[in-house]
């Protein structure tokens, strides 16, 4: 099997793809992108390793549950969104391989044998892989929020790409909830974007698609120095899955596969390899 790419995909807002919005097309462009992810990937993966912005632990924690339930970790949405089903299986053999690779790199890890998929996993992947027939292992972020450590995690997991495993980070390239909610209340129509989100997204595109692999690692390690960085991410948990994906990308070039404007901010997706 040829080497699989690595992906950073936006997971939207809560169960956004499975409910009504005003305006009705708010999430249509992002959902259409997610539906085409399998085509972008090419060879069907035998499993997915997913890093979401919604799971943090003191040490890297590996989901090791053969039948993960769903964690409806969003609040105040329509009752129907708490009945969403996504019965993708876990993959204990892949969990063991993740543990082996982390251990070989000197990265501390532990298993979680009961945790389910949070909405940063099942919401976008239900759009991308609706049959839920590909096993998934979720891996946590580090609560330290150390950008270099998350890149190192990705570097350790790189061999999975040659073993039929797709490494996916899910988050948002812009995640200032105050700005997003204010824009929604003001009637954001998807035609204009917060200038700070434009600046930060332009920086991301430059770093991820035009700089050398060494330069992009250095830039992401110091991401707080980017234009409007802290305005885009008051807290960086929705950005750090990108660091893992970039670490796993190695020398592969990056490209932006989605640029959308949602709730008054630019949101993008990136693919490496």
Image (tube, rainbow, N blue to C red):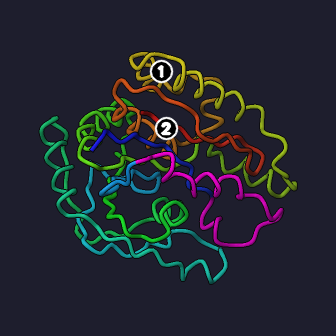
Q: Is residue 182 left or right of residue 242?
A: right
Residue numbers of the magenta segment: 13-42
Q: Residue at position x 82%, y 65% from top? A: 22
Which residue position holds label 2?
271
Q: Estimate the spatial distance between the alpha carbons at disc 1 and disc 2, rounded to whole Å.
A: 17 Å
Instruction: State the SS at label 1.
Output: helix
Residue 140 at x, y = what percent? 34, 52
Relative side of 179 to 201, left or right: right
Q: Residue at x 32, y 34 (%)?
A: 149
Q: Are marks 1 and 2 in contact (CB under 8 Å)?
A: no
Q: Is residue 125 magenta?
A: no
* Mark 2 element type: strand
Q: Give the x, y percent position of residue 2.
A: 30, 40
Q: Is residue 134 left or right of residue 100?
A: right
Q: Quadrant of residue 201?
A: top right
Q: Earlier in the sequence, mark 1 or mark 2?
A: 1
- The residue that disc 1 covers is 219
Residue 96 point in image, percent of width and height: 15, 55
């Amino acid at each position: 099997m040829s080497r699989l790419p690595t992906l950073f995909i936006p997971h939207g807002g809560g169960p956004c793809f499975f409910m009504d919005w005003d305006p009705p097309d708010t999430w249509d462009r992002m959902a259409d992108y997610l539906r085409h992810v399998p085509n972008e990937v090419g060879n069907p993966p035998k499993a997915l390793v997913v890093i979401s912005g919604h799971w943090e632990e003191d040490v890297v924690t590996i989901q090791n549950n053969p039948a993960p339930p769903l964690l409806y970790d969003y609040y105040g949405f329509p009752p129907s969104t708490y009945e969403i089903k996504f019965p993708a299986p876990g993959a204990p053999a892949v969990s063991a391989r993740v543990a082996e690779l982390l251990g070989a790199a000197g990265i501390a890890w532990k298993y979680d044998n009961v945790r389910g998929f949070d909405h940063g996993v099942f919401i976008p992947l239900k759009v991308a892989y609706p049959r839920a027939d590909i096993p998934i292992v979720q891996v946590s972020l580090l609560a330290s929020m150390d950008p270099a450590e998350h890149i190192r995690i990705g570097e350790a997991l790189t061999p999975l790409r040659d073993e039929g495993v797709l490494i996916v980070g899910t988050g948002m390239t812009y995640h200032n909830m105050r700005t997003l909610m204010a824009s929604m209340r003001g009637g954001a129509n998807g035609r204009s974007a917060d200038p700070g989100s434009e600046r930060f997204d332009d920086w991301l595109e430059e770093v991820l698609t035009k700089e050398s692999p060494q330069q992009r690692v250095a830039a992401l390690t110091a991401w707080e120095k980017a234009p409007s960085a802290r305005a885009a991410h008051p807290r960086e948990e929705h950005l750090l899955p990108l660091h893992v994906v970039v670490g796993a990308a190695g020398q592969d070039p990056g490209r932006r596969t989605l640029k959308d404007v949602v709730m008054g901010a630019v949101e993008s997706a990136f693919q490496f390899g």
